[in-house]
Image: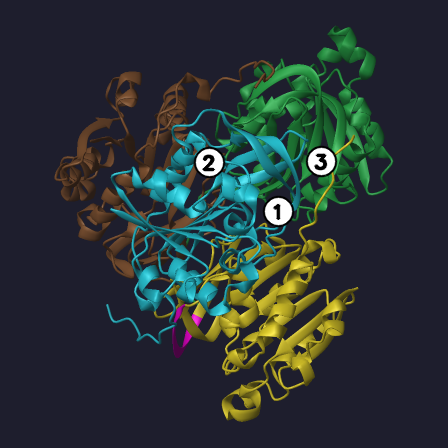
Chain colours: A cyan, B green, C brown, D yellow
């Protein structure tokens, strides 16, 4: 059983009518709902306004894969909590960063770069092209996923070279973006997935749900590291 | 002085009016012309109908960077000559594969994969987006290069993960393609660059010329290997 | 059920007493034996002296993971059979190249490089260090695997940069070698694993067996490609 | 002219006789000395006990390549200065991290991982093997560099997969370590180089000096980014 925690800053959906209309109970509730159908996945949610932003050590210790959606409140996330999330990833927890979370503290800390991009908000149609059709994350989708309306993201995307690029988004207005990127950091797997502006029902598209489900399974830890993953021990001379 | 050889199968320009009109003396002559202006570059050309396809060992030994354009005659290139080109790259010669050369024998042999793609020929407008603006190959061009008309190439492109992806092409009709890709193979650098259909004057666009000039300088060998790059020598026990 | 074919050139074990003593029925028989214990794996063997070198299209179509051991007879493998193996990998079949198979035709064709190295045969002790302890292939082994006697391989190893380096071998005499390397080629996974000289009982070491079992599971195809993985189809303009 | 700043925490050389004996004026003075001979390099030094740790914005703005040596005082480096160094790298400044600087704040921030390792201090002989003899950083050195005495570092080294691994260290006692690793972060190049314990005269070895000189030239920025490398600008719809 893969234990997933869906984390959301949960701000737009409480303050902006356009977002509330699409996700009345929050983006996290929508993601939880479609993940809960899966027999091998168990889901809980956490939001930024909870105590310790819903990310106590106990929560992280019991999370195999963390899904993250953040935007305007990203800089309000205390550094120590961001650091705690990063450490959990290095110890093996998988993590999926969605959409505007490219500027979340944990993502930037794990990447070591600015993670910036260019954007415009015109509700463009996006085609999410599959670059590597053999990758587990894109099984069950066709040559591309059609998103009727999406915020436009544009290169250059300030990330380290992905270990594996699996999707490129192409927008109606002509822009492109590396929309599906994989990295390893310590014992943990990191997946960045671009779709999901708060005012369009992107997470209700079946293929998007399929990709997120696949990503959860791909992100599942092979092994959780013990504390030693962070220490630099003094060793003895080999004798064998 | 960087010694460049521009190789062209030189078939379309002799047989198809549309290609002859754009490149009356062949694509190789056009590329030679704009490279010859550069003070640090010396250029010669070679074509498939020459003896040994213009690629004698003497030519390769005196080539620092080989530029390759091939298409319908790719399977007529003798395997031993393709192998000779591959060996020259492994020994340090830089190589730039243009457009339809994705299916050339030397490219497929260096990649180890099918190198296939999807395509259509509708003269789409292409925007060639810069993914890594700090890379030497894209210095002197803006956020993207606009190509008024180009053959459309589409993912998935059957290549190994590039060591560095530096450009993504976006076509008017909605397709995307990894249009600028870098690899190391042995001592040599490999650059694949998608633009350049034979019936559109793509190689007359100043930014395209800038990119090819930059690529020549990027591909210049750091060092040429001696024969040992191919042998597996029996060594003696270390004594120091 | 993962369908494994263990392929062996099966020459040393029939002609050299030292090899016959260690592997009286051939290296392939030894590998088959320890894999057969696993409930999720079914194993058959093939050798170079069989018809079509034991690698008919039917065999490859029914193989999920091919394990390869070759050495002095590598250049006797017909090119068309090497090509057939390469195509099967590109279509999704996993492949594990052992020891001297670094110079096998299928490995060199998949890598696109010389795949050469330096070597000496003094029965050195080797320590096989784990560089990425979170990788599925090294689960169940400690910080390193001790191999009492092994042929020494030494860098530089003429391969493309691995997608993931997971083991480095260190020899008693002071040499080092990238002993466990992963790549993707097309739909298929490739694993190179250095241990296994024919005159030392390396494949009888429990941790070596564990690594090969893990590698089989890691190499299992996510999806097998249909014929389209090799074609470059002409597509129509998108209409959605 | 490449403007290099050699930064040193400069603690051991003032407090430990063994270090003072080897580097009476500090490690930074030794490195400055051998770099100053080069006609294309101009060098200054900075140390942790200077104001703002010697790393004012003005210093960083006028540094093309920063060389870093830190150890026991790494956690005394103010976070804002570490962040300033990181930002300078993302904007194009090259950086070389030496030896124990694997745990420096700027390195860990750029990598996004724990950057930990195992170690012992027995003055082992180290052989620094060249994995990629065609890389600019290792030109002018042989198959390996012999270091008579060095602190032993051992895998696993908690780093993201290097963009390019160019050296592997092998120690007398049997350990191995990825001793020369390259990454891109933003517009800047990062090189980690393991040799250089404070009590052994490693930086007086000619080949080690050659490698550091080469690394300075490899790290030189192709282009310095303006402020936009950190912003995520709202763009207008394309009209061309």
Q: Is residue B65 magenta?
A: no
Question: Measured from the top left, where is residue B222 in percent x and y?
Answer: 66, 48
Give the quarter of the image for residue B142: top right
Q: Which residue is mark 2?
A: C111
Which residue sits at x=49%, y=17%?
A: C231
Above or below — where is A104 with respect to D29?
above
Q: Chain of mark 1?
A: A
Q: Can the viewer see residue A179 in this picture?
A: yes
Q: Residues within 10 Å of mark 1 (few under 14, many from 20)?
A: many
| Of marks 2 and 3, the one in the foreground | 2
Q: Which residue is mark 3?
A: B62
Residue contact between numbered discs 2 and 3, judged by CB atoms under 8 Å: no
Magenta residues span D117-125
Q: CA distance from mark 1 to mark 3?
A: 40 Å
Image quarter in which the C terminus of chain B is found: bottom left
Above or below — where is B159 with respect to A212?
above
Question: Measured from the top left, where is residue A83 in percent x and y?
Answer: 46, 66
Q: CA distance from mark 2 to mark 3?
A: 26 Å
Q: Secondary structure at mark 2?
A: helix
């Amino acid at each position: 059983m893969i234990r997933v925690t869906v984390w959301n800053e949960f701000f737009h959906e409480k303050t902006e009518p356009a977002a509330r209309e699409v996700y009345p109970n929050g983006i996290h509730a929508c993601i939880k709902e479609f993940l809960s159908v899966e027999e091998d996945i168990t889901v809980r949610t956490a939001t930024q306004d909870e105590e310790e932003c819903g990310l106590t050590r106990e929560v992280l210790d019991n999370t195999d894969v963390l899904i993250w959606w953040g935007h305007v409140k990203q800089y309000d996330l205390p550094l120590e909590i961001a650091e705690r999330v990063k450490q959990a990833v290095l110890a093996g927890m998988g993590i999926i960063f969605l959409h505007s979370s490219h500027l979340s503290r944990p993502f930037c800390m794990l990447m070591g770069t600015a993670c910036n991009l260019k954007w415009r908000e015109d509700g463009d149609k996006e085609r999410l092209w599959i670059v590597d059709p053999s990758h587990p994350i894109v099984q069950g989708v066709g040559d591309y996923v059609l998103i009727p309306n999406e915020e436009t993201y544009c290169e250059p995307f300030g990330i380290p070279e992905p270990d594996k690029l699996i999707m490129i988004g192409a927008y109606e207005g002509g822009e492109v973006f590396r929309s599906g990127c994989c990295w390893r950091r310590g014992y943990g797997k990191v997946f960045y997935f671009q779709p999901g502006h708060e005012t369009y029902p992107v997470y209700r598209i079946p293929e998007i749900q399929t990709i997120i489900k696949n990503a959860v399974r791909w992100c599942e830890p092979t092994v959780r590291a013990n504390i030693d993953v962070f220490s630099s021990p003094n060793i003895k001379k080999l004798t064998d």
